Amino acid sequence: MAYPTNSPWSTAGYPNAPHMGSVPLPPPGSTTPQVTPCKLPYSAPHANHASIISLHPLLSYDPSGRMMFDIRQDLRLLCLRPPFTPDQYREQAVGPASTRMAITVPNAPYWQIDVSNPQGVTVWDVLTRLSQVLSTTVNTQEAAALAAGIQAASASFNARCGSDSRVRAQGMKRFDFLGMKFFFVGLTRARDGSDRWEAHFAPRI
C-alpha cells in the first residue's frame, strides 16, 4: 500500500482534539520507498547491548495519540500530529533495526500480528499490518475463542453498521472486539517480558 496522499480527516466532530495542520504527503501511486536508516536519537546507545531496543517515537505509546489513526478507516486517512512528518514512515520501527516484530492486542490475545521486512521493519510496515490484520472478517472459530468479548463486539458492530445493510453484510471485523476503542495510541513492550509488543487503542483522542 502506498503512503497516504491526502488527509481528508476533519477534527470538527471531535471538540477535544487539537488542531492539526495539513502535511504534504507523497504523490498518488507512489510505491513503498527504499528504507533509509533512522537518524533519530532513539537508536540504541550501545551497539554491544543488543537487548536494548528502542521504539520509534511515532509508534511509542501516548494516550493522547501521536496520529489520528482510526483502525476502522482506510489507512490513507491517517493524519499525523505535529511535529511528525510522512518522511518518518520510512524509518526503522525499532533501533537497532529488526527484520521481524510480533505484536499482540491485550484485549484480543488470539491474534498475533507478525510484521516482517528483510530490510528492517519500518513504521509504515507496522501501521499497514495492524490495519490488515484487524480489518479481517471474524470467522466462527475466532468468535468462539473470543466468546467472553462477543457481547461488547456485537454492540460495537451494531453501532458501526447502523442501518447500512452493505456494511452489515460484510460481517463482524476483528476490530469490533476492541469495543469502542478504535484509535491507535501506540505500542509498549509485552508485560510478560517477551520480545513481543502490545498495541493499544483508545475510544477517542
Image (cartoon, rainbow, N blue to C red):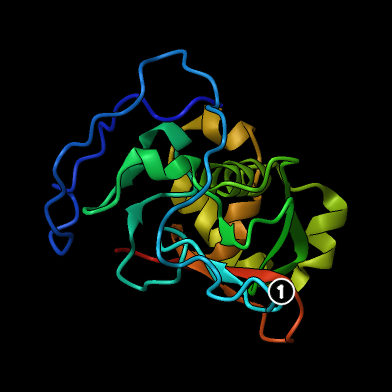
Query: Toward which corner of the image does residue 6 lie, by quadrant?
Result: top left
Q: At 74% from the left edge and 73% from the top edge, which residue is drawn? A: 195
Query: Toward which corner of the image does residue 18 lie, by quadrant?
Result: bottom left
Q: What residue type is labelled 1?
A: Ala
Q: At 64% from the left edge and 56% from the top edge, which residue is drawn? A: 97
Q: Viewer-proximal residue, 15 or 198?
A: 198
The spot of residue 197 in percent (x, y) is 65, 69
State whether residue 95 appears in this view: yes
The spot of residue 54 in percent (x, y) is 55, 70
Q: At 62% from the left edge and 61% from the top edge, which residue is drawn? A: 177
State whether residue 200 appears in this view: no
Above or below — where is 17 with respect to 147? Answer: above
The spot of residue 9 in percent (x, y) is 26, 38
Q: Viewer-proximal residue, 48 or 85?
A: 48
Q: In this rendering, would 51 be left or right of 145?
A: left
Q: At 33% from the left edge and 60% from the top edge, which residue is drawn? A: 66
Q: In which quarter of the image is the N terminus?
A: top right
Q: Viewer-proximal residue, 94 or 200?
A: 94
Q: In which quarter of the image is the C terminus?
A: bottom left
Q: Regarding mark 1 in the picture, which secondary structure is present there?
A: loop
Residue furthest to the right: 141
Label 1 sits on residue: 50
